[in-house]
Structure formats: C-alpha cells, structure tokens
C-alpha cells in the first residue's frame, strides 16, 4: 500500500467508525423519542427537522444543479430508505422490539442486500454469502430467543424485518439506478418524500404526544445526529469508497448497539445473547468477504 492510499484510508476508517456510532445510537435515541411521541409522529418530527436543517444549508451555501431524472431516483430511494425503513423500525420499537433487537436485525442489511442483488439484479453471489447469512441468522436467533415470551416481541420483530427489507431494497435500487445529485440535495429530496408519505399515518395517530425532556432530547438526537450528521457522513463514505466497503461497517452495528443498550438503557443480556451478537457480527463480516481474485465492485457516486 503506497503513502497516498494510506493517507486516504485513515479518514475513511475514522469516518466509518464514527458512522457506526451515530447509526447505532439512533436506536437509543428512538427509544427515548418513543417515550413521549407516537411512532409515526416521531418519524414525521424527525424528517421535518432534518429537512429544515438540510434545506437551509442547500439554500444558503452553493446551491447544487438539479436533474429531473435524478430527482425521481432520489425520491424513490427516499420511499424505501427513509419512509419505509424508519417508519417500520419506529413502529417495531413502539410495538415491543427493544433498541438492541431492532439494531441487531437492521444490522443484517449487507447480508440481505447481497442475497437480493443475486436474486434481482444478477450480481454474482459470493462464496461466503450463504454461510455468512446462516451464521448471522443463528446469532439473531440466540439474542431473540429469551425475548420470545415478552408481549409484542413477535409483532415488533416482524416489523423490524420489514424495515430491514425496505433498507435493503432501497440500497439495491440505488445500486441499480444511482443518482448523480449533490449529496445534500439527494438527502433533502429523500427526507421530504418520507415526510409527506408518513404524514397521513401521523395524522391517523392524532399526532399523539406527551413530551418530556428525555423524549424531546431523543427526537433532537435522531434529527441532528442520526439523520443530518450520520446520513451525510454515509454519503461522504460512499463517495470515498465502494458501496460494498461502506456496507461493511454494518457488521459492527449489532454488538455496538447491544453495548450501548446495556450502558445507557440498562438492558441485560445473558452469555448466549452476547454470543448471538458476536455471531451476527461475524456472519455479516463473513458474508462480505470475497475470495481472493473475486471481482470487486467499482466505486459509484450514490446517496443513501
């Protein structure tokens, strides 16, 4: 590795680790937000606040050029990556899935994306993908098994799986039809689409809320740190490396979310559950390892 590659690797590595921390902390932020806000009301507040911040940034600093086809691609991506993923994941957590369980299931995104790419867009299935998927699912089973009798867990896990499929579908959509929009504008379009899609659901809840300081701080956290900073950092990572490399950071999400839930929320996990977190991370890591000589993915300019 030459000096130029080493210099480029360090910021990307630091950025990847920071992104994992921001992404994982979002489940804890959502936990607190849902203490005072109904799930779709919380998502609408998140998207409205994020769109306001990003929109002001777009207006006051170097307005980007706009392409109508790229706008449609970004809008469709927002339907899956923002409205679908966060709508389902917040509903899952409000129903009974814990922050750790939600993060664990969503952390399987690289595995389901690789399987979907092989099934739907003809990408070759890596030799390690299926073994990694089996190991990852085994880890999920170990973590969730002690929770099976908790009220709402089955429905919550089902909704979290729907969130995972939406996230993977949006990722595949972008891989198939990438947009060339400037990152801030791509994110703004996605946020606005998600806002208007979920607004009727929040209205059906009656915009139910009983705000408290923990819940308000939770909304602010997922809005500013998770949505604005985290997703923009994700965009930067995509532009400095391949989508496969960026998704590789997701293998750290399950164990880090588990540790955060233990430290911040007081969740307690048995030895077999910690083994499950480790297995889930190992499965995601293995599924993304290409055998030597396998084709590598060409870097693209994509947006989450």
Image (cartoon, helix red, strand yellow):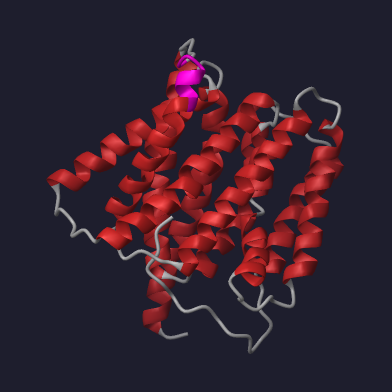
Q: Residue drawn 37% across and 55% down?
A: 74
Number of on-image labels: 0
Q: Residue at x 42, y 28 (%)?
A: 199
In the rendered image, residue 263, in percent from the top left (x then y), is placed at: 64, 32
Name the residue nearer the viewer: 99 or 111. Answer: 111
Q: Position of residue 19 (x, y in %)?
A: 47, 51
x, y percentage for residue 183? 31, 56
The stretch drawn in magenta includes residue 124:
no
Q: Quadrant of residue 260?
A: top right
- Figure quadrant of residue 115: bottom right
Q: In this orientation, does residue 167 appear?
A: yes
Q: Is residue 302 above or below residue 36?
A: below
Instruction: Classify residue 191 as left or right of residue 36.
Output: left
Left or right? Give the position of 202 relative to 179.
Answer: right
Residue at image position (45%, 20%) is 203
Q: Residue furthest bottom?
A: 293
Task: Specify the quadrant that holds the C terminus.
Answer: bottom left
Q: Using residue 145 as the reference point, say whether residue 176 is left or right of it.
A: left
Q: Is residue 198 above or below residue 209?
A: below
Residue 218 is at least partly visible in this image: no
Residue 100 in percent (x, y) is at 67, 37
Write down the region rendered in magenta.
Answer: 201-207
């Amino acid at each position: 590795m030459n000096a130029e590659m080493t210099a480029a690797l360090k910021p990307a590595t630091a950025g990847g680790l920071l992104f994992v921390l921001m992404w994982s902390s979002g489940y804890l932020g959502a936990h607190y937000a849902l203490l005072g806000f109904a799930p779709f009301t919380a998502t609408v507040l998140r998207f409205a606040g994020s769109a306001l911040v990003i929109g002001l940034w777009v207006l006051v600093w170097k307005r980007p050029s706009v392409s109508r086809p790229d706008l449609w691609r970004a809008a469709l991506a927002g339907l899956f990556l923002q409205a679908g993923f966060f709508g389902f994941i917040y509903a899952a957590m409000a129903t009974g899935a814990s922050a750790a369980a939600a993060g664990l299931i969503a952390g399987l995104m690289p595995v389901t994306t690789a399987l979907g790419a092989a099934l739907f867009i003809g990408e070759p299935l890596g030799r390690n993908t299926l073994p990694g998927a089996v190991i990852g699912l085994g880890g999920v089973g170990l973590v969730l098994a002690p929770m099976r009798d908790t009220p709402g867990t089955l429905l919550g896990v089902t909704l979290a799986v729907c969130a995972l499929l939406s996230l993977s579908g949006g990722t595949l959509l972008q891989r198939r039809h990438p947009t060339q929009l400037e990152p801030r504008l791509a994110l703004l379009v996605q946020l606005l689409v998600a806002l208007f899609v979920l607004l009727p659901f929040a209205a059906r809840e009656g915009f139910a809320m009983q705000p408290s300081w923990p819940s308000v701080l939770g909304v602010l956290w997922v809005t500013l740190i998770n949505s604005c900073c985290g997703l923009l950092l994700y965009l930067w990572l995509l532009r400095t490396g391949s989508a496969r490399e960026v998704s590789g950071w997701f293998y750290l999400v399950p164990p880090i979310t588990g540790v955060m839930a233990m430290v911040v929320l007081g969740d307690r996990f048995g030895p077999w559950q910690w083994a499950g977190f480790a297995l889930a991370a190992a499965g995601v890591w293995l599924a993304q390892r290409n055998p030597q000589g396998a084709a590598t993915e060409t870097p693209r300019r994509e947006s989450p």
